[in-house]
Image (cartoon, grey):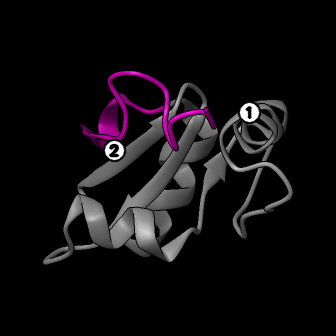
Amino acid sequence: MPPAPFPKGYPKKVAVSSLPDQVRSWYQMSGEAKFAVAIAPGVWAELPPGATVADAVAAELYDGFCASIKAYERKYTPGQQHAGTCW
């Protein structure tokens, strides 16, 4: 059986203010997003005003820590890479 597309408990809506410095600053530069979607530990997607969690997930534009994004892709989306920014 293939793995679930997300770790247990994810995706979930989180406040941008709760994100690590690099990601929080990146999202605050746009000045609009107050929330993000945690895709997996260390992996987030911006949640623009009016968008749903499903919209953010479907955009597949994931930001976060490079190692966390690669680990997520390896386990949950083998062979797929996601656009976004990593640190």
- Label whose residue precedes the other's in the sequence (1 or 2): 2
53 up-or-down from 48: above or below:
above
In front here: 69 or 86?
69
Residue 64: give x, y in percent of width and height.
Answer: 65, 43
Residue 41: percent from left, percent from top: 55, 25
Circle 2: residue type: Val
Is 13 included in the stretch rendered in magenta?
Answer: yes
Q: Choose mark 1 or mark 2, whichever is in front.
A: 1
Vertical placement of 49 versus 14: above or below? Answer: below
Marks 1 and 2, how far apart at CA: 25 Å
Q: Position of residue 71 (x, y in %)?
A: 79, 31
Q: Which residue is mark 2?
A: 16
Residue visible at 74% across and 36% down in the picture: 65
Stretch in magenta: 1-19
What is the crowding at mark 2: few (fewer than 14 residues within 10 Å), some, or many (at least 20)?
many
Q: Is residue 33 visible?
A: no
Question: Residue 17: which quarter of the image?
Answer: top left
Left or right? Give the position of 37 relative to 87: left
Asked if one can make out residue 12 in the rendered structure from this viewpoint, the answer is: yes
Q: Residue furthest left?
A: 50
- Which residue corresponds to the image point at 47% horizontal and 59% vertical from the top-left? 27
Circle 1 sits on which residue? 75
Disc assigned to residue 42: none
